[in-house]
Each structure stands twice: as C-alpha cells, then as structure tokens.
Amino acid sequence: MKSLRKELWFHVPSRRGFINITPQVEEAVKESGIKDGLALVNAMHITASVFINDDEKGLHRDYDDWLEKLAPHEPVSQYRHNVGEDNADAHMKRQIMGREAVIAITDGKLDLGPWEQVFYGEFDGRRKKRALIKLIGD
Amino acid sequence: MKSLRKELWFHVPSRRGFINITPQVEEAVKESGIKDGLALVNAMHITASVFINDDEKGLHRDYDDWLEKLAPHEPVSQYRHNVGEDNADAHMKRQIMGREAVIAITDGKLDLGPWEQVFYGEFDGRRKKRALIKLIGD
Amino acid sequence: MKSLRKELWFHVPSRRGFINITPQVEEAVKESGIKDGLALVNAMHITASVFINDDEKGLHRDYDDWLEKLAPHEPVSQYRHNVGEDNADAHMKRQIMGREAVIAITDGKLDLGPWEQVFYGEFDGRRKKRALIKLIGD
C-alpha cells in the first residue's frame, strides 16, 4: 500500500470565502503514484470545511447568503460559545457544508463527476489555516 | 490490495426522489471479493446525494418537506445561480444530505447497523445521472 | 493491509447529548498497529451522528438549540414518520451533523488538527446504541 500526506495552507483575507483546491489534490495524486485508492481531504480547523460542488460564482454567493440565514453571525451574543470569541456561527456553517470529502482514485486520477470540484470553505478567516490531503492505495 | 469501481445510473422522473441502492452496493462488495476494507459511495452530480438513513416512506416525505423549507425551490429568482438554470436549491439540499457515504466492509459484507440503508437522493431529476461505488481492501 | 473493527456502546440518559470519543478511537489506532491509513468512525444508528468539532460546553449547548430550531422535536405530529414513534426530528438533526468521520492515520496516530475532537452525537437516547470504528492501512 502506498500513501501520501500533504498539508495545504490558506489565508483568506475576509471572514468567509471558497477556494477551489482541485488542482492541488490532483497534483498530490500524481505525486503519490497511486493508481487505485481513496483520497481524504479535510479541513484541519473546526470553523472551515472541505466540500465538493460547482465552481460557479453565483452559487457561492447563494451559499454565503443561505448559510448566513441558517446560522447568522450577528448578534454574536446569541451564542453561548461566544465568550471572548465571535465565531460560533462558523462552527455551525461548517457542519452544514461538512468537514471532509472522500474521493475515489482510479487510473492515477481523481475519479470525479463532470462538474465536481473540491473546495476549501472558510467561515472564520483572516488568519492562516490548513487542510489535509491523505491518499492511500496501490 | 483489491479494488472495484462501478457506476450506478438513475433516471428519476420527478424533480426529487430517494432510491434505496443498498442491494447494488452489497452486490458490488460480493463481486469484488473484498473481505475487509472500505466502500465509498458518492453522487457524481452536484445536485444529488448519497446518504444513509431509514427506508421509511413517511420519513422520506418528511425529508422532502423539510429540505424544501430549509432551501426552497421557489421563487427561483431568489438565487444568483439561477441564470438560465433553476436548480440552485438542489445544490443546497445536497449539502445538507451529503455527497457520499463511507461504509466498512467486514467478512465480505457491508458492515451496517440494523436500520442503516444506503440511498441515492435526487434533487434535480428528470435526466440520467449516476453514482460511483469504489471499494478497496483485502 | 492491516485492519481493525471495534464497536463503542453508549447509553445517553437524556434524549440528546454529545460524547467525546477521541480517546477510544486513538486507543483503537494504537491497538491496530497501523502506521499509515484511514479511520472510519460512524454511528450505527440513523438517529445519531459521529462528527468532529470543538470540545466546548457552550458550543454544544448552541448546537442543541440550533438543531432544535432547524428540526424541532415538537409538535411530534408535524412529521409523517411519527406514527407510533416520536423521533423524526432526530433523523433530521443527524443529517445536519453527519453520520461519519473519516480521519487520516499518520505515524500510528490520528492525524487531527489542533482543536479537532471526535464526538458521538445522540439525538434519540435513553437506550443502548453504538458506533463503529473501522481502521485500514499498513
């Protein structure tokens, strides 16, 4: 069994943002030499997400509005977690979008559907944070 | 390490629907000869879901109502994504229900709890779409 | 390829609760002798969750309030599933929090970010229920 571990670092300048990391994950698969296996990609922070969806700017703005409606940032005092912090909403937004994506590796490539793209979703940015890529297979 | 890759195709005649795919995933495990490993089952489309829950018609109607409340289809104009499209809500519903399920394989079988069943969840049907089964193990 | 399978049993005395199971999963990794691989941890029940987030009591009370707002328990008659049952809301809460976590194993340890902790989330307790740990790797 082969394996590869790699960290991706981000610094989103605003509180929230979505970054397409498909090329970096694809590159890691190539580097690993794995032909058949599984790729795990997960946020290493609990106020961020790795998810798979469409690379479409309108949709990303819709996601942002929708998540803000389901788990509003303001008023920060509505959350018990926000004692000396203001990011309780980010912990909730990340549960809806998910922590991780598991992707098949086939013929040495990510086995994605035609529109599937892998994103890092930031919900409490303005500092350095990271995601983990872990590949296993043959 | 053994592996198996298989696609399942669907054509849900309505916009939304849930299909129990547990027998097809179980069949793939048998076909693979894998005794111990992991099964990844994921939607290959970004407006559909693979999830695990109960095979109970009342619950599925509850899910449909609930998802429609959290991410309504109408008015389609409320979403920036809906320029020449009308499926932004499907991209949201799928985030709540999830893209994929990862299931243990033990003794050559899916290692599921007593009521766990695997579903393909369609949120933008009326066309051919597919899910991926990827199995790895020994 | 090495593998290990282990069940964790719970009996949450109230309807809802969160239990940190990181030490048990870490212990299983040590027991398996796996240095590089993947750990799957999933609820075996469809009204419970395994998820990764912060071990912070205020946040857990926020989660409880928030999930109750998104999928209220009462009135139980609002759900078609609740014929002789009263747990439809638990099936919904679990979809938001997720069924499973997949965690990298590196150097014989869970490869978690600094604040990542693994939780069993109970949404319909007061009876014995369980989660599954399945590890594969070398």
Image (cartoon, coloured by chain):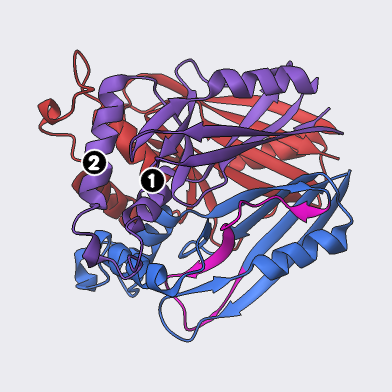
Chain colours: A purple, B red, C blue
Q: How crowded is the residue under tag 2: few (<14 C-alpha within 10 Å), some, or many (20+)? A: some
| Quadrant, the C terminus of chain A | top right
Indicate the position of residue B74 as horizontal and vertical percent values.
Answer: 12, 34
Identify the subunit bearing mark 1: A
| Quadrant, the N terminus of chain A | top right
Identify the subunit bearing mark 2: A
Q: Which residue is mark 2?
A: A66
Q: Which residues are magenta?
A: C108-130
**A97 or B96: nearer the eye?**
A97
Whether residue B21 is visible here, answered yes or no, is no
User: Which residue: 19% across, 13% down?
Assistant: B84
Q: Is residue C128 magenta?
A: yes
Q: Is residue A106 left or right of residue A129?
A: right
Indicate the position of residue B52 as horizontal and vertical percent values.
Answer: 50, 50
User: Which residue: 37% across, 38% down?
Assistant: B94
User: Which residue: 58% across, 37% down?
Assistant: B41
Q: CA distance from mark 1 to mark 2?
A: 16 Å
Indicate the position of residue A78 as horizontal and vertical percent values.
Answer: 22, 66
Q: Is residue A45 above or below residue C66?
A: above
Q: Which residue is mark 1?
A: A124
Q: How crowded is the residue under tag 1: few (<14 C-alpha within 10 Å), some, or many (20+)? A: many
Q: Is residue C124 left or right of residue B116?
A: left
Task: Identify which amino acid the numbered label 2 is placed on.
Answer: Trp
Judging from the image, what secondary structure is the residue with disc 1 in?
loop
Task: Identify which amino acid the numbered label 1 is placed on.
Answer: Asp
Are the residues flagged by discs 1 and 2 from a single subunit?
yes
Q: Is residue B15 above or below residue C74?
A: above
Of the image marks 1 and 2, the number of the one nearer the N terminus:
2
